[in-house]
Image (cartoon, helix red, strand yellow):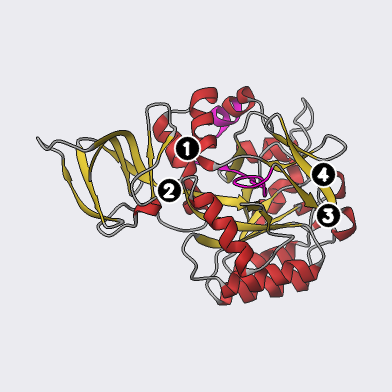
Amino acid sequence: MLIAPDLLWESGRGMTGMGVTLAGGLVTHIAPLARATPDLRVAVLMPGCTDLQVNGGGGVLFNNDPTVDGLERIVAAHQTRGTAEVMATVITDHPDVTETAAQAVIAARTMPGLLGLHIEGPHIALARRGTHDPDAIRPLDARTVDLIAQLRAHDIPVMLTLAPECSDAGLMEQVAATGAILSAGHSDATATQTAAALDAGITCFTHLFNAMPPMTSRAPGIVGAALLSETYCGLIADGIHVDWDMIRIAMAARPVADRMFLVSDAMATVGGPDEFDLYGRTIRVDHGALINAEGALAGAHLDMVTACANIHHHAGVSVAQAIRMATDIPRTVMGLRPRSIVLETPVRDLLALDADMQRIILPDQ
């Protein structure tokens, strides 16, 4: 099959006038289209998305099933929705759950589509815990540092979300020294505390605005410090977690381009039933939002292709920038190069979009 994309996204840049041939589940030829007649025209052909915050999918929440089988089901649910690779995310829980999740990722480290492990909590601010279990919250300690060192010894990408005001700077520096990414989130930090955390190794902010105090005229806080920094910030672009105009403001405020990226914060409902259990409580989908019995948000019912389309249609982000935010920038956050479309790239790792940025299923997907 010869595909003619209006825009071919390859190694972090857009190309026009190209043709891509697929056969046997692989890319077999890439060349200028010239006068060839394509079998299929698409608006965009790009590498599949990279999602750095995936709590679950396919009916599985990683905290509830921290196994290789659980990872396989989560990865598969997102791959069938245009995400080529995920950071499996284990949220605040008792240490044995986190450690079991880490061992599962080590065992599954060669699994296609599994990028690494995101440990979100338990070293967070009680006041900004959201739906995280308050009984499992604790300060950053040597146990977590040692666990991250084990993961990094296997060359597994790791992100640790913590509240910097609740974390010892020396321990944060030890984590950063392993090559793991320190991300500030679920935090009540002041702007001054955030600035100090940037010096201690913070290079990212987890779901900007959410589980953070709002900016005020006399207290910019962690959000203001994040926006003014040259550090990476994740966003949940579902129209529920963050207002579209706030995303516009955040994008305009950044002093350096390409520092904003998309995450899904997906839960088990993506590709699964419309409810699941978290800490023994039922979380359900209600008008697109995931809420607990008290009506508080608990993750997102979102995939990356939808997030990419949303930020283009509702926040005025260009198609090219939306693509970068869903593919290249997340990989840059983790110290990785943009993914390429080259000969023998599996079709499952490609994402085709129509003019409305809706996914087109290709043969062998």
In this view, which residue lies farthest toward the right? 135
Residue type marked 1:
Ala
Q: Nearer the viewer, mark 4 or mark 3?
A: 3
Inspect this view and state whether residue 235 appears: yes
Residue 343 in magenta? no
Bounds of the magenta segment: 249-273
- Name the residue that disc number 3 marks: 279
Q: Name the mark on residue 128.
A: 4
- Mark 2 or 1 closer to N-term? 2
**Magenta stretch, main secondary structure class:** loop
Q: CA distance from mark 1 to mark 3?
A: 39 Å
Mark 2, residues whose alpha carbon is within 10 Å: few (<14), some, or many (≥20)? many
Q: Name the mark on residue 48.
A: 2
Q: Secondary structure at mark 1?
A: loop
Q: Secondary structure at mark 2?
A: loop
Residue type marked 3:
Tyr
Mark 3, residues whose alpha carbon is within 10 Å: few (<14), some, or many (≥20)? few
- Mark 1 or 3 closer to N-term? 1
Q: CA distance from mark 4 to mark 3?
A: 17 Å
Residue lying at 75% horizontally and 30% vertically, measured from the top left:
215
Q: Is 209 on the left or on the right of 252, as rendered? A: right
- Name the residue that disc number 1 marks: 257
- Mark 2 or 3 closer to N-term? 2
Q: CA distance from mark 4 to mark 1?
A: 28 Å
Residue type marked 2:
Gly
Residue type marked 4:
Arg
Q: Nearer the viewer, mark 2 or mark 1?
A: 2
- Residue 48 location, x and y as percent? 43, 48
Q: Nearer the viewer, mark 4 or mark 2?
A: 2
